[in-house]
Image (cartoon, helix red, strand yellow):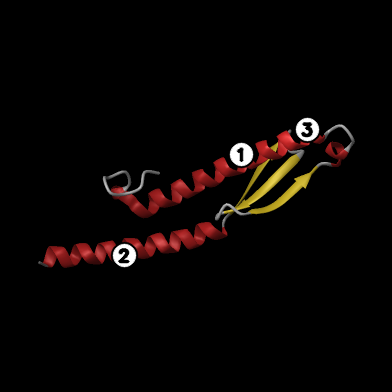
Amino acid sequence: MKDLGALMKQAQAMQQKLQEAQAQLAQTLVEGAAGGGMVKVTLQGSGELKGVAIDDELLRPGEGELLADLIVAAHADAKKKLDAAQAETMKAVAGPLAGMPGFPKF
């Protein structure tokens, strides 16, 4: 029964680390860019859009479709970076258990 108690303590410690990592990730900010930096999007770790910066050159008449495409591309870039940061953090928390059955795949 000592092994079961030790296993429970390890599980509780991992759960605490996971909660701390999730709180840290929620505060993380990542920036995605498109069009050579003409459009920049900032996402918070929760996925919430925190900001959009658009170069004045794209605000001219007739640039609407291009601007829309660049916003979507910048968001995709930021989302990719956010997903990578989250996966890296979760791998660090899970340690040797990462990828084992019953644990999320990162």
Residue at the image point whose x is 73% and y is 38% from the top: 37
Q: Earlier in the sequence, mark 3 or mark 1?
A: 3
Residue at the image point whose x is 77% and y is 32% from the top: 66
Q: Are marks 3 and 1 in contact (CB under 8 Å)?
A: no
Disc 3 crowd, CA 10 A, few/some/many (<14, 14-19, 20+): few
Question: Residue 78 appears in which quarter of the rendering?
Answer: top right
Query: Mark 3 against mark 2, which lies toward the viewer?
Result: 3
Kindly report the distance in space between the C-alpha atoms of the residues bearing marks 3 and 1: 17 Å
Query: Mark 2 against mark 1, which lies toward the viewer?
Result: 1
The residue type indicated by label 2 comes to Ala
Q: Which residue is more in the foreground, 70 or 92?
A: 70
Kindly report the distance in space between the C-alpha atoms of the residues bearing marks 2 and 1: 34 Å
Q: Are marks 3 and 2 in contact (CB under 8 Å)?
A: no
**Residue labelled with disc 1:** 76
Quarter of the image that includes the N terminus: bottom left
Q: Is residue 49 left or right of residue 90?
A: right
Kindly report the distance in space between the C-alpha atoms of the residues bearing marks 3 and 2: 50 Å
Q: Is residue 77 left or right of residue 13?
A: right
**Residue labelled with disc 2:** 13
Disc 1 crowd, CA 10 A, few/some/many (<14, 14-19, 20+): some
Outermost residue to the right: 61
The residue type indicated by label 1 comes to Ala
Tag 2 secondary structure:
helix
Q: Position of residue 52 (x, y in %)?
A: 73, 48
Tag 3 secondary structure:
helix
Q: Which residue is more in the foreground, 63 or 34?
A: 63
Residue at the image point whose x is 48% and y is 49% from the top: 86
Q: Is residue 33 left or right of residue 55?
A: left
Q: Which mark is residue 65?
A: 3
Outermost residue to the left: 1
Q: Is residue 48 above or below residue 80?
A: below
The residue type indicated by label 3 comes to Glu
